[in-house]
């Protein structure tokens, strides 16, 4: 069972599980488009449900009795404003609590929850799992709180829970509000790209590698709320990323003359130590950035230039 199955990562995970022969239940937010699931919509059982609706969620989970649960449903908003604080916490924390309550009497063998590397905040990189979280935005705070809730659940119930702390993920069909899709679309259309000076350094991990990590975590059934960083370990500044995409496109990316200001409490390096995932899950990102970007660019070319 996948919560947030119509999202970027959730849809890729659902597609991969279908290919692996799994019987997949997809929980999706009512009213959201199912375009990312269009090619497998007849191969999965889809339930529209808002995870804030504990009663309806409980009925679905009781009916499905899932063996493995991948929890990806979340509201993502990296702005520093408090305007979405209530929504972020009601979904990312309250929804997680609702899910855990529904699993009280379910004999499952793996629960895989997700967090964001942004929750490490002002720690000194490379970020390691044992670091105390220091979130810098309402979003990362809500995800950090969800992590603590999942760990508490694992410790108090003795249930198998893994928590995947994701660094920046990219690939085909990602939301256009993200930086890399905006960059690729700007390169293909010739429209100016609005961005900061681009000094921030990030590590980008291709979606297929991340899905490998989810499957390995699902097989492991780790007790005690074990946390695993998932990322490529290769950092690049946003400015360098623009140049790389331009080189792969074979054309310049036009940047807007107006340089956007940096966010308050901007994190200059989001880079992780991924040795725990390598040692305990036998996971490592294998797709180099050029190869992953080329696949992603091709996906956009086929849709924007057709």
Image (tube, rainbow, N blue to C red):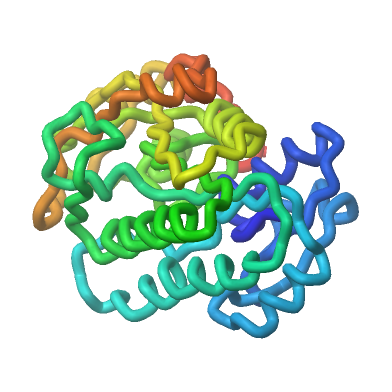
Q: What residue occupies the far right of the structure in this picture? A: 42
The answer to whether 103 is drawn above or below residue 278 in the figure is below
The image quarter in which residue 299 lies? top right
Q: How many marks?
A: 0
Residue ID at (53%, 24%) = 281
Classify residue 176 as left or right of residue 1: left
Q: Nearer the viewer, residue 163 or 287?
A: 163
Q: Is residue 238 visible?
A: no
**Horizontal placement of 165 versus 111: left or right?**
left
Which one is nearer the viewer's eye here, 305 or 130? 130
Residue 88 in the image: x percent, y percent? 37, 71
Which residue is painted at 89% across and 54% down in the image?
Answer: 42
Rendered location of residue 301, percent (x, y):
59, 33
Which image quadrant: the N terminus? bottom right
Please say whether residue 62 is visible from this viewpoint.
yes
Image position, residue 146 (x, y; %): 39, 61
Give how far across and how far down residue 189 sits, in percent: 46, 40
* Left or right of residue 293, residue 191 in this image: left
Q: Is residue 110 above or below residue 270?
A: below
Q: Residue 139 falls in which quadrant of the image?
A: bottom left
Which of these two is toward me, 138 or 59?
A: 59
Residue drawn at point x = 36 percent, y = 73 percent = 89
**Eyeballing the image, is 151 above or below 145?**
above
Q: Nearer the viewer, residue 150 or 107?
A: 107
Instruction: Tell me the quadrant of the picture where the C terminus can be found.
Output: top right
- Residue at 54% from the left image edge and 38% from the top image edge: 222
């Amino acid at each position: 069972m996948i919560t947030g199955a119509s999202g970027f990562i959730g849809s890729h995970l659902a597609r991969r599980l279908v290919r692996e022969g799994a019987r997949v239940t997809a929980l999706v937010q009512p009213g959201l488009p199912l375009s990312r699931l269009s090619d497998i919509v007849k191969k999965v059982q889809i339930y529209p449900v808002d995870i804030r609706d504990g009663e309806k969620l409980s009925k679905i989970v009781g009916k499905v009795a899932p063996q493995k649960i991948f929890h990806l449903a979340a509201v993502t908003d990296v702005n520093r404003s408090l305007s979405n604080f209530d929504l972020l916490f009601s979904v990312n924390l309250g929804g997680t609590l609702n899910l855990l309550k529904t699993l009280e009497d379910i004999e499952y063998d793996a629960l895989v929850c997700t967090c964001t590397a942004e929750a490490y905040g002002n720690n000194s990189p490379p970020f390691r799992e044992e670091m105390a979280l220091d979130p810098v935005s309402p979003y990362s705070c809500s995800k950090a709180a969800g992590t603590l809730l999942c760990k508490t659940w694992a410790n108090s119930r003795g249930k198998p829970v893994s928590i995947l702390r994701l660094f920046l993920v990219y690939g085909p069909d990602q939301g256009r509000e993200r930086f890399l899709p905006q960059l690729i679309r700007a390169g293909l259309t010739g429209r100016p790209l609005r961005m900061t000076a681009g000094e921030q350094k990030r590590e980008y991990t291709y979606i297929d590698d991340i899905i490998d990590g989810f499957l390995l975590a699902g097989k492991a059934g780790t007790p005690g709320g074990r946390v695993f960083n998932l990322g490529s370990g290769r950092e690049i500044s946003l400015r360098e990323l623009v140049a790389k995409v331009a080189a792969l496109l074979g054309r310049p990316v036009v940047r807007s003359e107006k340089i956007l200001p940096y966010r308050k409490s901007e994190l200059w390096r989001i880079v992780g130590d991924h040795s725990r995932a390598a040692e305990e899950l036998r996971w490592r990102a294998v797709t180099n950035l050029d190869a992953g970007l080329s696949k992603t660019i091709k996906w956009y070319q086929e849709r924007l230039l057709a």
